[in-house]
Amino acid sequence: MLNQLLKLNTKVFNTDPEGKGTSYGAGVEKISTRQGFGEGLVKAGTDNEKIIALSADLSESTKANLFAEKFPERFIEVGVAEQNMASVASGMASMGKIPFIASYGIFNPGRNWEQIRTTICYNNQPVKIIGSHAGLSVGPDGGSHQALEDIALTRVLPNMVVISPCDSIEAKKATIACAKTKDPTYIRLARNNTPVITTEETPFEIGKAQIVYIPEIGLAHVGIIATGPILYRALIAARDLEKMGIKTKVMNLSTIKPLDTDAIIALAKEVKAIVTVEDHQIAGGMGSAVAECLAQKYPIPIEFVGVNNKFGQSGTPEELENKYGIDIANIIKKVEDVLKRKINK
Amino acid sequence: MEKLATEKIKILEKTANNIRKDIIEMLVEAGSGHTAGALGMADVFTLLYFHALKHDPKNPLWVNRDRLVLSNGHICPVLYATMAEAGYFPKDELMTLRKFGSRLQGHPDRNFMPWLETSSGPLGSGLSQAVGMAIADRINIGQKTIYTLLSDGELDEGNTWEAIMLAHKEKLSNLIVIIDRNNIQISGNTEKVMPLHDLKDKLKSFNWNTLEVDGHNFEEINNAIINAKNNKNFPSVIIAHTIPSKGVKAWENDYKWHGKVPTKEEAEMALVELGASS
């Protein structure tokens, strides 16, 4: 059941009338995380005139256009030039501005990684990097446009904060929160409308993980740690597993860096088996970050749900999630796998 | 900004000569680094730090200072030697170049020396940063001049041309770019490695205020900066034709001096040559 303390959206499980959890069905409102970002940026810009937005010809796609309409004098369109955008933002930050640079994740931080490394992170400038259309959920655009490496690219950089919001409301809160920090920050967004899991009342703090699902009664056997909108899949899997008699706790790990090691270790100590879930390559992703932590502090069996060393292709998000093994069925399978390893220990 | 009087030019020449000597001594002590570009740009740096720049070496983070972005960070010996000459830090610190714990990192690093405007070295992103500074200063109505120094070799980087387009679109008349046109890069002559052909025509076609000077002629450099400052419509670029390793005849115009340093013996001969000409 949902953790009551977090005041989550009680309609989350209404999306799954079939009980199979393979569809983002009706019953819960669905809004994209990029929409949440766009609204958050307007709020941040209203509160602080140092906020600047830069776009590389994708302001409608990234929803930075909402800011551009309200604050045209603080909006810079650089054209299809993500490398330039990153370093222009660094220069603006050195003059006291707080720039947000928005494009698709594949180009930002993909195309412009070295500029982000040297001119933003090395200089430790408060530039906020917005990568939308991340993950397989981009769907029909195909593999070239599905950013599956962006968490790895950003979390490896010193000084960088990495946030992967689970829904539009959390994306809005993350945008507003990061506008108030001095840290270079990457926010990972998705294109699709996805279920709204949290509410305005749900607490949010950069660097804090949350246990969003707990067993109705008794102790959990396995911990599921998810990041991004795929958290919804993890929730459906947890509910289905509970019906099968396997009890889990689900953690929303929206901040991937800095990692909330206290929360992760506490969960690990309690359940002694972990499954991580992300719409990203397994290599270098959120699961890797969790494994780096637990291998050192509290080694227990871990299974990874993520894309395993493959590029994507065109298809609906559901078709792709199934093909590349990041669907509900595979989350359930990995929980069963990790449980076997735990029992065999 | 003032025109240069004859007496001032003589002082600048002497200062540039001292900076060249410091560069050679630093590089020999460091045992690695970049010689040709550093020596070649000594006159431009001297004119900037001792005449053109609005700055205060005793208050390096003075908010109203002009900004200077060195994009091709590998020529930093000339930046450090000029800053020391101007009084930013003691000259004996120059001998710590490239050594562990030194503020004078192998490439400029503002984590070690916070009054550098940026860390640089990876080519092609300095102009972008300067464009960002110029846009921010326009929003702030700060009325600063943003100077950027580029090498001709780093014009191979596409990122530079992205910034050139944006600077024109934003009409950044507070931006002055000086390109070190020395015709060499690390593996050969620029026209062999990646031809720039007629660089002036290229830049003009991007509708910048495009100027060309002898990069060793203080009066020409100064007049070009005055011209650039008077242009209130567009960003300006000054193509400074320089001689790599300028001042040491045996090393001049030879691309092999881009990325190597002199031996003690070579340095001693060079210092004698520079001593005689001061």
Image: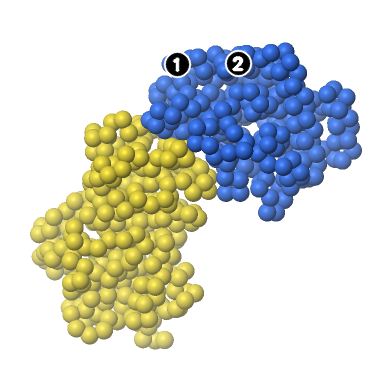
Disc 2 packing (10 Å; few <14; some 14–19; many ≥20): few
In which quadrant will I find the C terminus of chain B?
top right
Measured from the top left, where is residue B189 in percent x and y? 69, 26
Q: Quadrant of residue A163?
A: bottom left
Question: Is residue A244 in view from this perspective?
Answer: no
- Chain given the colour blue: B
Q: Of the residues shown, which amino acid type is indicated by label 2?
A: Glu
- Residue A33: which disc? none
**SS assignment at label 2:** loop
> B178 and A49: which one is in front?
A49
In the image, what residue occupies the spot 58% across and 41% down? B115
A113 lies above or below A250 = above
Instruction: For mark 1, name the chain.
Output: B
Measured from the top left, where is residue A342 in percent x and y? 37, 83
- Chain given the colour yellow: A
Q: Of the residues shown, which amino acid type is indicated by label 1?
A: Lys
Question: Is residue B268 in view from this perspective?
Answer: yes
Q: Give the labeled residue for mark 1.
A: B232
Q: Give the labeled residue for mark 2.
A: B2
Q: Quadrant of residue A164?
A: bottom left
In the image, what residue occupies the spot 78% across and 27% down? B17
Q: Residue furthest front?
A: B58
Q: Which mark is nearer the camera, 2 or 1?
A: 2
A167 lies above or below B243 = below
Instruction: For mark 2, name the chain.
Output: B
> A35 and B49: which one is in front?
B49
Q: Is residue A38 left or right of residue B252?
A: left
Among numbered discs 2 and 1, the one appearing first in the sequence: 2
> B1 and B248: which one is in front?
B1
In the image, what residue occupies the spot 41% across and 55% down? A161
Measured from the top left, where is residue B89 in percent x and y? 68, 42
**SS assignment at label 1:** loop
